[in-house]
Image (spheres, rainbow, N blue to C red):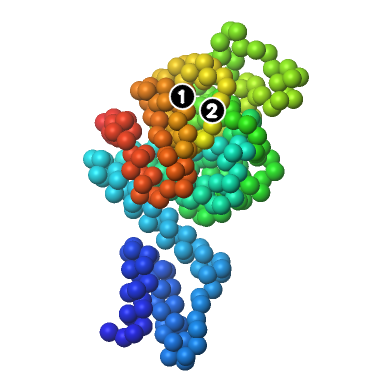
Amino acid sequence: MTIENDFYLFLINKIDFQPSPVAHDKCLCYSIELVFCFRANRSYTPDLTSGTYQQEYFLITLQKSRETAGIHLQKKGLDPASLPHVRAGLCLDVSGSMRPEYRDGHVQDALTHLLALAMHMDKSGRLDVFTFENDCAQCRVPATPDNYETFVRDHILDDSSVPKWGGTDYLGVMSLVYRHYFNPSPLRLGRQAQPESAPVHGLLDRLFHRQDPSNVPAPFAPEPAWTRTPTLAFFLTDGETENERQIERLLESQAPLPLFWVFVGLNHQSSLLTRLGREPDSEFILLEDGVRISDDRLYEKLVTPKLVNWLARLQG
């Protein structure tokens, strides 16, 4: 075995993953280049900032996370290959307290891990992304294997149309999720999901950024063909919200719809989400370390018996 092959095996073992043909060739090329420089008695540092290298690195990362997610599904008795088509969405808290997690790239890592899990369910390989603070929005495109590596930067941080760094309000984004996946639905949303004593949203509410859920922006390109397709919605937050009773009534009114909520508290034990997690088609998960978590640990937390049973029922 040549020294080039030794270095190649070292690189492959470092990524601990059976690489794609492109990654195979790239690792071999880097190995040969490294050995050449070693024999020429000069240092070698591959251009890790090049678009080609970064794209391949991110593809390896996504594929590795997808395989890890598949292992966790199999451990719980599910065959990833035979799972039915399930739409997948992700609601991301963009309130002020989350700003450091976005700045340091941890939210991007979490999105990558969740896309990898969603790819086992959504056969189109997409993850719809919604954001919320006092206001809510839906990203103009879903996260996919083609755009995910800089998705948070491109479609949240650098998009001026996405409200950011305010307070925390669950109601608007949850209503938006229902409208996106189940519109047109015979079940009524908006004001009918609120108690009769709900306050009128006037000037003071607008000044303090309190959102009227009946004015939630329409989702981008709703597709009626999906109106009864089962949907899995991840909901990540580190804060509490007002309108608790209105949110509970919203979930109660939409209970017949095939949607499973995975509420995730980021180092925060939300009393409301804990209660909502006791409903038949929802779960509450506490992540003590927030979004600063490995894919393996995240899947261990997310793939719960309750979610597994919901997916198993869909399999029939």
In the picture, the quarter occupied by the C terminus is top left
Specify the amino acid type for callout 2: Glu
For this orientation, the residue located farthest to the bottom is 40
The residue indicated by pointer 2 is 240
293 or 138, nearer to the observer: 293
Whether residue 4 sits left or right of residue 267 in the image: it is left
The residue indicated by pointer 1 is 271
Please tell me in which quadrant of the rendered image residue 6 appears.
bottom left
Q: Are marks 2 and 1 in contact (CB under 8 Å)?
A: yes
Whether residue 176 sits left or right of residue 11 in the image: it is right
Please tell me in which quadrant of the rendered image residue 283 appears.
top left
Please tell me in which quadrant of the rendered image residue 205 appears.
top right
Residue 69 x, y percent position in the rendering: 34, 48
Q: Can residue 259 be seen in the rendering of this structure? A: no
Q: Is residue 250 above or below residue 308?
A: above
Q: Is residue 304 above or below residue 292?
A: above
Q: Is residue 120 above or below residue 48?
A: above
Residue 36's tag is none
Residue 89 x, y percent position in the rendering: 48, 37
Q: Can residue 196 be seen in the rendering of this structure? A: yes
Dot 1 falls on a residue whose secondary structure is helix
Q: Is residue 14 above or below residue 206?
A: below
Q: Residue at x 62, y 38 (%)?
A: 96
Dot 2 falls on a residue whose secondary structure is loop
Mark 2: few, some, or many residues within 10 Å (few <14, many ≥20)? some
- In three-dimensional space, the C-alpha distance between marks 2 and 1, rounded to whole angstroms, equals 8 Å
In the picture, the quarter occupied by the N terminus is bottom left
Residue 159 x, y percent position in the rendering: 66, 45
70 or 222, nearer to the observer: 70
Q: Residue at x 52, y 55 (%)?
A: 149
Q: Residue at x 52, y 64 (%)?
A: 54
297 or 25, nearer to the observer: 297
